[in-house]
Image (cartoon, grey):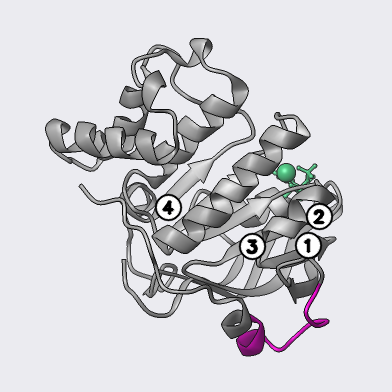
Amino acid sequence: MENTGPAIETKKLTKTYGEGRTKVNALKSVDLAVNKGELLAIMGPSGSGKTTLLMILGLVTVPTEGTLVLDGDNIYNGRARDFQKLRREKIGFIFQFSNLIPFLTAEENIMLPMDLVGVPSQKARSRARELLDYLEVTGRAHELPERLSGGERQRVAIARALANRPAMILADEPTASLDTDRGLSVMRLLRQLSTEQGTAILVVTHDERMIGEVDRVLQLVDGAVVSDESQTKAGSPVSKDPPQGASQSAAKPPESTVQVET
Ligand SMILES: Nc1ncnc2c1ncn2[C@@H]1O[C@H](COP(=O)(O)OP(=O)(O)OP(=O)(O)O)[C@@H](O)[C@H]1O
Ligand SMILES: [Mg+2]
């Protein structure tokens, strides 16, 4: 992971589904830059394009138009790319339901992304243990997901997303399946690790109560960005629609304080 510059940057990102009468403009010319260490909430009504945006940023869906630079790497510049490899190395995913593999233990679930990029298993195991510690679920290492609570499952899923030290983590409604307290604690955890690990974290959420925990809120309506506001600590906007550069420097957190190293 490079140390300077945004984790992700898009210019005029556009996604159109279908043709003719069934054509849907799911994203309309989205410009977005998210720095390492920044926690961004993506909000908007159902159908406004939140998941589409997340899936494009996650290199799962190809945009119709526009540029996407991931960790300094211009992805759609005509060169053939190994998207699977890029995803495994650069991006962590967290889902609404933890999506843990049911027949693998918590520890094995966290090891999986490391196995996929060829980390030797002893090293992967020791990093998984460190992450379980960091997320305060050490005692659950050898349990299968069905034996974990919803909050514990999400913590293991977060540990799995962190495994390969991604430049960016994408989370689609990670608190929606949890009650308010557990949801807030997951959100605070994401807050803490974006700062400590220097990871950009983009979270789709419908829940206004989570907004107090984030640096910045992006609002989508009908596939277009209608506002992009930095938040103060208290959760209220600092300024309305600040210029791109200004909002990013304002939201930049202090340098990394804690490292989870193997
Ligand atoms: N694969 C697809 N084919 C055609 N249209 C699609 C496809 N995926 C999404 N859309 C359309 O694109 C628009 C944006 O959908 P998207 O799933 O991104 O919304 P969302 O903001 O995530 O909504 P929700 O809050 O309900 O999850 C919608 O009009 C949707 O119907
Ligand atoms: Mg969605």
Q: Which residue is mark 4?
A: 91
Crowding near pointer 4: few (<14 within 10 Å), some, many (20+)? many
Residue labelled 1 has its Cβ within 8 Å of some atom of ligand 1: yes
Secondary structure, mark 2, is loop
Three-letter code for the amino acid on which mark 2 is drawn: Ser
Q: Is residue 50 above or below residue 186?
A: below
Asked if the residue under mark 1 is in contact with the one under mark 3, i.e. CB atoms within 8 Å, the reply is no
Mark closest to the chain's N terminus, 2 or 4:
2
Give how far across and how far down residue 72 sits, in percent: 38, 75
Q: Residue at x 36, y 17 (%)?
A: 105
Three-letter code for the amino acid on which mark 4 is drawn: Ile
- Of residues 87 and 123, the one drawn nearer to the viewer in this rendering: 123
In the image, which disc is placed on residue 40? 3
Mark closest to the chain's N terminus, 3 or 4:
3
Q: Which residue is mark 1?
A: 223
Give how far across and how far down residue 39 sits, in percent: 59, 62
Q: Quadrant of residue 212?
A: bottom right
Residue labelled 4 has its Cβ within 8 Å of some atom of ligand 2: no
Rendered-image quadrant of the N terminus: bottom left
Three-letter code for the amino acid on which mark 3 is drawn: Leu
Real-space Cα distance between discs 2 and 3? 17 Å
